[in-house]
Image (cartoon, rainbow, N blue to C red):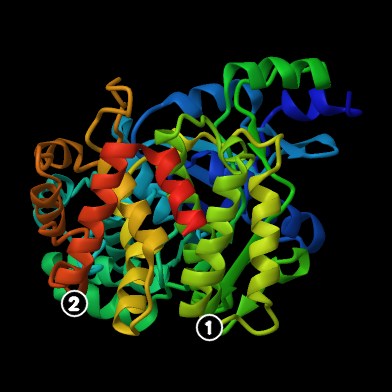
Amino acid sequence: MEDGLRDRLYREPEDTPAGIVHLGLGAFFRAHGAIYIAEAMAKSGGDWGITGVSLQSPGTRDRLRPQGWAYTALELGPEGEKPQVVSVLREVLVAPEDRQAVLDVMAAPQVRIVSLTVTEKGYCHEPSTGRLNRAHPDIRHDLAEPLPKSAPGFLVRALQARRAAGLRPFTVLCCDNLPENGHVVQGVVLELARLIDPALADWVEAEGAFPSTMVDRIVPATSPADLDRLEALTGTRDEAPVMHEPFRQWVVEDRFVDDARPDLASVGVQMVEDVTPFEHMKLRMLNGTHSSLAYLGYLAGYETISDTVADPEFSAFVRGLWQEEIIPALTPPPGVDLAAYADALHDRYANPAIRHRTWQIAMDGSQKLPQRILGTIAEARAAGRAVPGLTLAVAAWMRYVSGRDEAGQPIEVKDPLAPRLAELWQADPARTVRGFLALAEVFPPALRDDAGFADDLTAALSGLIEKGAKAMIEESVNA
């Protein structure tokens, strides 16, 4: 057992003020950003403690509160497991219980950053365009009521309160997997603010900051077995640990209101002028292949990504995606060898200690595919390059969201468009493809109007239905 782990896990919480409010306190941020911030405070000081906010349920708050908001982060490496206690949280609020309390803490003078990991769907935008979805029920509520429900609504109303109090705006730091995420969140916030108060929108646009970021660390869901294993390892029961791989990366556009931020560079965060090459590399090479393996691997009967790439055919398939379809569409970040990056990704996928479930990665595909896969396909087709592997991955997503696997057993589809997607399924694959391609919120115009893509997608879907995912992967690799 690590010396003092129990004392540091079950302790009185620190009473130093929080300089950061984080919306969407899930496992990823607690295994990534929170650790970087804790390390930056330990190295360079500053009142950068974090108030976490759950926008939905009290579960995380209820598990953390008896532990004084501390928790264990367990590194899962091929050579063994390494626990550390993270004690950077100061409090956790649950928005549905007291929305005003959340706004009050976001409007507090000492808060200089509001960060977010609310997943792609949490921004209430249309992934294919990046625009605010004004028909979203939470946005309609937030336009009519002063106490918001959505993440954009909380940002706008908290900024409104700060302006009314004569305070500077906070920096909005998005940590979700969106291309140009700072730009996207800024656009959604400004659009919503302009609908509420045009003068507020002008102030936020002139005085605020929305730096883009790229985040990378594989964080599998924590299971009850993980809790028991961690207790056996440390001798301490932790009801709210997070699991993570050894690798981590955080690239941040160095643009903050009044330059107020933790000393992130001192603990390995890459502070850059332009995040775009890094985020395109990560979204397309990691997230794009993660989604591809999730849908095809799930349909082939594999539970985890490591199980999937242990299959030599799937291993060859994902290497082909990188080498032949994704890398040709990318501009490498300065000093990065994309082929070496692909090799490192494969090693991370194959880590047997990371039980990253294909079902978990497959969630919310309608929100993820535009930036992870469809952008690459559209660019490749415009350049005259074939992308059969990525097209097969899109067909696998369509097959997955039908709600039935290859054995006819039900799939628990987690997607905001799940009912609509299920209704699009027809006996004729060509009709099914036409229905899916008509989804303007998913497919960009370049693909919706591409008859050749429709034909290729129909052929891939027909193959999945007739032969199954495993056979289609084997055909793809041996073509």
Task: Assign a secondary structure to mark 2.
Answer: helix
**The one of 239 and 388 positioned closer to us in this rendering:** 388
Using the image, determine if residue 117 lies above or below residue 356.
Answer: below
Q: What mark, if any, has residue 199 been given in the picture?
A: 2
Identified by mark 1, the residue type is Thr
Using the image, determine if residue 479 lies above or below residue 210.
Answer: above
Q: Please state the horizontal and vertical placement of residue 288, each as a whole percent of the image.
A: 45, 58
Q: Please state the horizontal and vertical placement of residue 235, each as a whole percent of the image.
A: 82, 16
Q: Seen in the image, is 133 located left or right of residue 152? A: left
- Give the residue displayed 47% in from the left and 37% down from the top: 358
- Distance in Å between CA atoms under marks 1 and 2: 39 Å
Determine if residue 124 is in view: no
Which of marks 2 and 1 precedes in the sequence? 2
Q: Seen in the image, is 136 located left or right of residue 171? A: left
Q: Residues within 10 Å of mark 1 (few under 14, many from 20)?
A: some
Q: Which residue bears the numbered disc 1? A: 331
Q: Seen in the image, is 28 located left or right of residue 432? A: right
Q: Nearer the viewer, mark 1 or mark 2?
A: 1
